[in-house]
Structure formats: structure tokens, C-alpha cells
Image: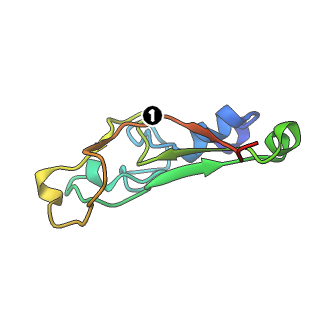
Amino acid sequence: ELQGGVHSADDMRRVIAWNDYKHDTIAQSPSDAIMARGDLGLFGRAGGGIDAKMTSVALLASGGLVSYGRAGPTNDDQPPFCWRREFEDTPHAGHPGCFDFGWGVFQPLR
């Protein structure tokens, strides 16, 4: 379903960060989606997709070594992932309290 609608870098970023499990015809839970989110499940656990990155031939051809990336689980269709009390036993030193980040553009310094 989703991959047939990929015609641009924006479309691809949307697909690889997909977790609209409440309206998805395939994913039965937030852990089943392309960008899994264990924290949203019935038993809430700190597990799932941790980042996303992509590039394409068109991006490379248009401007050199260009890629897109985002830190943390998806927050497109779901609330940002935040460390909660029940995740205290999961090591996360140096992490922000919440992962509420958008996509960034990465390329070599010139």
C-alpha cells in the first residue's frame, strides 16, 4: 500500500517513519508498524525503532552526498517517545528526556 505512493524524498521519509497503527490495515499494534513503538503497546516497553535515515540516487545526483536523518522513534502520527518511570531499568545515559525531533539534512562540509 504505502510503497506504491512513494514518488519523492518526502514520501519516502513518511513511509520509513510510518506508525499509524490505529488506521493501518496490516499493523495490529504499535510494535507491528514499520517504525515500531513498544512504548505505545499494551505492556509498554522501551523498544522499537530508534532512528531513521534515507538518501536516493536523485539526492546524490543533485547535490553530492546528501541524506536525511532523524533521531528517535517516529513522532509523525504518535506522541514523541519520552523516558518514563517504568523504563528506569533501561540504560539511557546521555539521552534527552523526550525525542521530539524532525528530519535533518546531512552532507559533508565543503
Q: Residue at x 73, y 44 (%)?
A: 66
Q: In the rendering, at what x and y percent does residue 73 appear? A: 41, 48
As drawn, which residue projects farthest toward the front?
Answer: 110
State which quadrant residue 4 falls in: top right
- Residue drawn 39% across and 58% down? 48
Q: Residue extending furthest left?
A: 85
The x and y percentages for residue 99 are: 35, 42
Query: With 61 as the anchor, is 48 left or right in this view?
Result: left
Q: In the image shown, does 100 or 65 lie closer to the viewer? A: 65
Identified at 38% across, 56% down, the residue is 31
Answer whether residue 47 is visible to the viewer in this image: yes
- Look at the image and tell me in which quarter the C terminus lies: top right
Q: Is residue 98 above or below residue 36?
A: above
Q: Quadrant of residue 81?
A: top left
Q: Determine the residue positioned at 18% across, 59% down.
A: 87
In the depicted structure, whether residue 45 falls above or below residue 72 = below
- Give amino acid for label 1: Asp
Element carrying mark 1 = loop
Side of 36 relative to 95 (left or right): right
Judging by the rendered image, the residue that carries numbered circle 1 is: 76
Is any part of residue 34 visible from this angle? no
Screen quadrant of the N terminus:
top right
Image location of residue 47, percent across then percent down: 33, 61
- Category of crowding for the residue at label 1, using alpha-carbon neighbours closer than 10 angstroms: few (below 14), some (14–19), many (at least 20): some
Nearest to the observer: residue 64 or residue 87: 64
- The image position of residue 105, as x and y in percent, is 63, 38
